[in-house]
Amino acid sequence: MEEKFNIKTVKVLRTTEAMILEVVFVLTAIIVWGIIIWMIHQAPDIVPTHFDVSGKPNAYGSPVGIAIPCIIMTIAGVGLMVLAYFPRFINMPVKITNIHQVELTIRSTRIAAITLLLLALATVYTMLGMPTPSPIPILAAIGLLFLEIIVFSILIYKAK
């Protein structure tokens, strides 16, 4: 009799891949936050903090305020790195039926965490680093995040 796969019984162990992605996450976080802190210190006292659809600033504030969404994205990234050790709580658009799908789900989660750090960097660069702010860096980071989700969803689906 064939035993059914139960994701709740999966134990995630430390692997070389996990260690590499965790080190990449930490190094990326250090570099991104170094750049964020440097850009905040270089910024004037009042900066645009929100833009309308046409790209014109419609709210102003302290550059430190721009760090708030970056802090949230970093915390979400750390949460994803931790969540990778508990795949039963990862919500995927595909039913997980085997261990290979679990491996792909974990990899997807870790890569998404790293991409969130890049989104934080894109946010600060857009607000403080560009002479004329453009949504292109933020949209590129969000597009990369969606691309990862789509690609991994297809890979997980095909790994049935």
Image: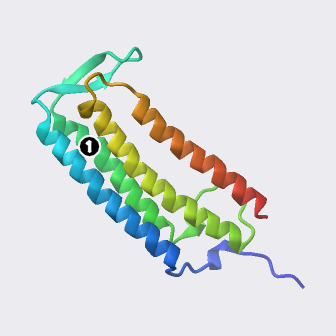
Asked whether residue 94 appears in the rendered view, the answer is no
Quadrant containing the N terminus in the rendered view: bottom right
x and y, in percent, of residue 89 in the image = 56, 64
x and y, in percent, of residue 137 in the image = 40, 34
Give the residue pinned by disc 1: 68
Between 152 and 73, the one lying in front of the other is 152
Left or right? Give the position of 36 relative to 78: left
**Quadrant of the rendered structure where residue 2 is?**
bottom right
Residue projecting furthest to the front: 131
x and y, in percent, of residue 94 in the image = 71, 55
Classify 10 Å Cα crowding around label 1: few (below 14), some (14-19), many (20 and above).
Answer: few
x and y, in percent, of residue 140 in the image = 47, 36
Q: Is residue 143 depicted above or below 82 in this figure?
A: above
Quadrant containing the C terminus in the rendered view: bottom right
Under tag 1, what secondary structure?
Answer: helix
Left or right? Give the position of 76 relative to 124: right
At x 56% / y 64%, what residue is drawn? Answer: 107
Residue projecting furthest to the right: 1
Asked whether residue 72 appears in the rendered view, the answer is yes
At x 20% / y 37%, what residue is drawn? Answer: 65
At x 62% / y 78%, what residue is drawn? Answer: 10
Q: The disc labelled 1 sits on which kind of residue?
A: Ile
